[in-house]
Amino acid sequence: MKAIIIAMAFICLGASAACAQKIHEAKVPTMVLSNFKKQFTKAVKPTWEMEEADFEVNFKNDGTECSAKYDKQGKWLSTEQEIKNAELPVAVKQAIEKEFPKAEIEESEMVTYPDNKTAYEAEIEMGKQKFEVQFSAEGNILKKEKILKKEKKG
């Protein structure tokens, strides 16, 4: 019984380490905070997380849900901005229809990188499966990750 409890503890610790962990702004390095505040002067209600070795901040910018990611030296890595599904490029919509027929797009985001490249992320629900898929503007799949659905409490 003791071995089972220890094994479960390790599984829980591993699962929580794989996910982003919320942190207080006071624990965010000065360069990260400084660069974020310079880049997003109109940001409202920032909340911080550690995602592996990087810092991610979720915030509203001019009323739009956004998140930005920085490394520990404060270098900006990417920004995700919520967009309407209708704002997805035609090539991305066509790729979704082809790859995920009859799927429902739950959420869409535009991702901007320092090299001025843009990608698009869509949270797609297909039956009982849910995916987060990143596409190039041309409709090529860049990343595809299956999301585990959280059970609804009744």
Image (cartoon, rainbow, N blue to C red):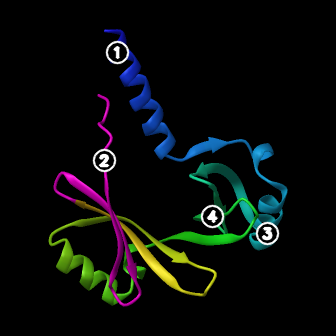
Looking at the picture, which amino acid does disc 3 mark? Answer: Thr
Magenta-tinted stretch? 126-154
Classify residue 62 by image quadrant: bottom right
Q: Residue 43 at what x, y percent from top left? A: 72, 63
Check the picture and name the quadrant holding the C terminus. top left
Secondary structure type for disc 4: strand
Q: Does the segment drawn in magenta span residue 143?
A: yes
Q: Which residue is mark 2?
A: 148
Depth check, front residue: 2 or 109: 2
Which residue sits at x=40%, y=84%? 136
Q: State how far apart marks 2 and 4 are (Cα).
A: 23 Å
Q: Residue at x 60, y 72 (%)?
A: 78
Mark 3 sits on what residue? 41
Mark 4, residue position: 69
Rounded to the nearest angstrom, the CA distance separating label 3 from label 4 is 16 Å
The answer to which of marks 1 and 4 sits earlier in the sequence is: 1
- Position of 10 with respect to 81 (left or right) is left
Q: Which mark is residue 3?
A: 1
